[in-house]
Image: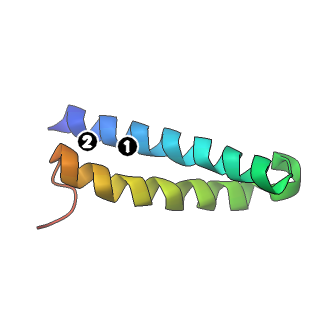
């Protein structure tokens, strides 16, 4: 169960970072202009979005039923 949860966290954070870079590319800015604070919170929010769905499909039990 611990391995499944770690995989969920790694996949979610990787997705969040990749999606944030795509968003930054789409709006035509760079990391310096966008800011590390905004980058971190955008990555975290997108990772949580995917993490909720992955929790359901992977059955890790992070969220209660």
Q: What crowding class fits label 1: few (fewer than 14 Cα within 10 Å), some (14-19), or many (20 or more)?
A: some
Quadrant the N terminus occupies: top left
Image position, residue 56 (x, y; %): 20, 54
> Which dot marks residue 26?
none
Local SS, label 2: helix
Image position, residue 2 (x, y; %): 20, 37
Residue drawn 32% across the image and 34% down it: 7
- Locate residue 25 relative to residue 48 in the image: left or right: right
Above or below, comparing residue 1 to residue 53 in the picture: above
- Locate residue 57 relative to residue 41 in the image: left or right: left
Could you say which is closer to the camera, residue 1 or residue 24? 24
Could you say which is closer to the camera, residue 25 or residue 40? 25
Circles 1 and 2 in contact, beta carbons < 8 Å: yes
Residue at image mark 1: 9
Residue drawn 43% across the image and 45% down it: 12
- Quote the CA–CA distance across marks 1 and 2: 6 Å
Local SS, label 1: helix
Residue at image mark 2: 5
Quadrant the C terminus occupies: bottom left
Image position, residue 43 (x, y; %): 58, 53
Residue drawn 32% across the image and 59% down it: 52
Residue drawn 42% across the image and 60% down it: 49
Q: Residue furthest left?
A: 65
């Amino acid at each position: 169960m611990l391995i499944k949860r770690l995989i969920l966290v790694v996949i979610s954070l990787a997705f969040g970072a990749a999606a944030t870079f795509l968003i930054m590319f789409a709006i035509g800015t760079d990391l310096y202009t966008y800011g590390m604070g905004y980058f971190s919170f955008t990555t975290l929010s997108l990772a949580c979005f995917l993490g909720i769905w992955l929790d359901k499909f992977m059955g890790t039990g992070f969220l209660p039923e």
